[in-house]
Image: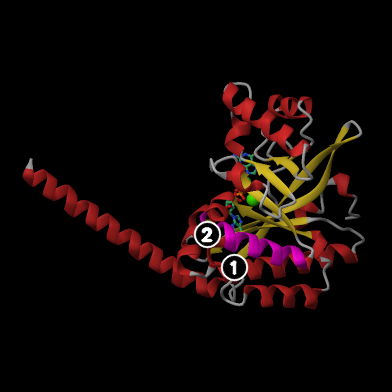
Amino acid sequence: AKENGKNSFAIFEKENHSNIKKEFDLTNDMILAINNNEFKLFYQPKMEYIDGKVVIVGLEALIRWFHPQKGLIYPDVFIPIAERSGYISNIFLWVLNEVCNQLKKWNSKGKDFNISINFSAQRFGQDNIYTNMSKILENTKIDPKKISIEIDEKYLAKNIETSIEMLNYMKSFGINITIDHFGINYSSLNYLRSLPVNGMKVDMSFINGIGSNTKDEAIIVALIELCKGTDIDIIAEGVETKEQYDFLIAHDLKKMQGYYFYKPMQAEDIEKIPELGFDN
Ligand code: C2E
Ligand code: CA
Ligand code: CA
C-alpha cells in the first residue's frame, strides 16, 4: 500500500508538472496572439419580448482563440490563465477596441447595437486600465452608452469596496454594468443594493432547472420579483428550449439569450440575420 501511495504521488506530481508546463506555454503564446491576429470575437444576440414578438436588442461579445498549432481554444480554457498571468487586462482592452471598431463599421452601414463585453475584475485599478479605456472610447468616438460590461459575481464578492469604486468609475463613462452569473454566490443579495449596477444576468444553471427543479424555478421567480421593485434590469441566459422560454415569458422576464434564439457567431454572420436588415 505504501508503495502504491508513493507511485500515485509520483504520477500526480508529473501531471501537475505538465499542467504547469502547458499553462506556461499558453501564457507565452498568448503574448503573441494579439499581434498575430489570433483572437476573434463572436457575437451572440440578446433578445427581448416586445409587443408579442421576440426581437434582437443587443449583442454579447465572446472571445475565441485560433491558435496556429492547437486550433480553436475556448475562453473557458485561456481566460483563467490570462487572469493568473495578468494578461487579462490586455485582452480586455483588445476586446473593447475590437468591439468599438466593429460598432463603427456597423454604424457606417446604418446599424447600431448595444454590445456587452465580459470583464474579469481580477486586477481592476491596475495596468492603467481606465486611462486606456477612455483612450479607446475617445479614439473610436463610440458612445459609451452603447457598451455594457458584464462582471462575474464572484469577483464582486471578493472586494466589495474596490468593486463599488471600479463600477462607479466605469459608470462615469456612461457604460452600463451588468452582474453576470447572478445567484451563484449566496452573498449576492446582500450587496446588491450597494452596487451601482444596471442589470443582472440570471445564471444559466437556474434556467437549466426549469421544468425539472422547483428550487431553481422558485429562485428565478424571486429574482424577477426582486428586480421589479428596483430599476435593475433582469436577463436570462442559456435559454435552450421552448419550455424555458415559455416559463420566463409567463413570469414576465422578457430579456433572454441562448441557443434557443441564436448561437454566438462571427460579425459577418450577424449581418446575415434577416431581422437586422443588412443589405447583403
Ligand atoms: P459567459 O459570460 O457566461 O458567457 C456565456 C457562455 O455560454 C458562452 O460561452 C456562450 O457561448 C455560452 N452559451 C450561450 N448561450 C448558451 C446556451 O443556450 N446554452 C449553453 N449551454 N451555452 C450557451 P463561451 O463563449 O465559451 O464563453 C465562456 C466564458 O468565457 C464566458 O461565460 C465568459 O465568462 C468568458 N469569456 C468569454 N469571452 C470573454 C472575454 O472577452 N473576456 C473575458 N474576461 N471573459 C470572456
Ligand atoms: Ca457574459
Ligand atoms: Ca454568463
Mark-to-mark CA distance, 2 and 1:
9 Å
Q: Earlier in the sequence, mark 2 or mark 1?
A: 2
Q: Is residue 193 magenta?
A: no
Looking at the rendered structure, the kind of residue marked 2 is Ile
* Foreground residue among 166 and 211: 166
Q: Which image quadrant: the N terminus? A: top left
In the picture of the structure, the residue carrying the numbered disc 1 is: 91
Determine whether, in the image, residue 11 is placed left or right of residue 190.
left
> Badge 2: how crowded within 10 Å, few (<14), some, or many (20+)?
some
Looking at the rendered structure, the kind of residue marked 1 is Ile
Label 2 with label 1: CB-CB less than 8 Å: yes
Q: Position of residue 17 (x, y in %)?
A: 28, 61
Dominant secondary structure of the magenta stretch? helix
Asked whether mark 2 and ligand 1 are closer than 8 Å, the reply comes as: yes
Asked whether mark 1 and ligand 1 are closer than 8 Å, the reply comes as: yes
Magenta part of the protein: which range?
A: 158-172
Determine whether, in the image, residue 240 is placed left or right of residue 16.
right
**Quarter occupied by residue 267:** bottom right
Above or below for 225 versus 134: above
Determine whether, in the image, residue 255 is placed left or right of residue 163.
right
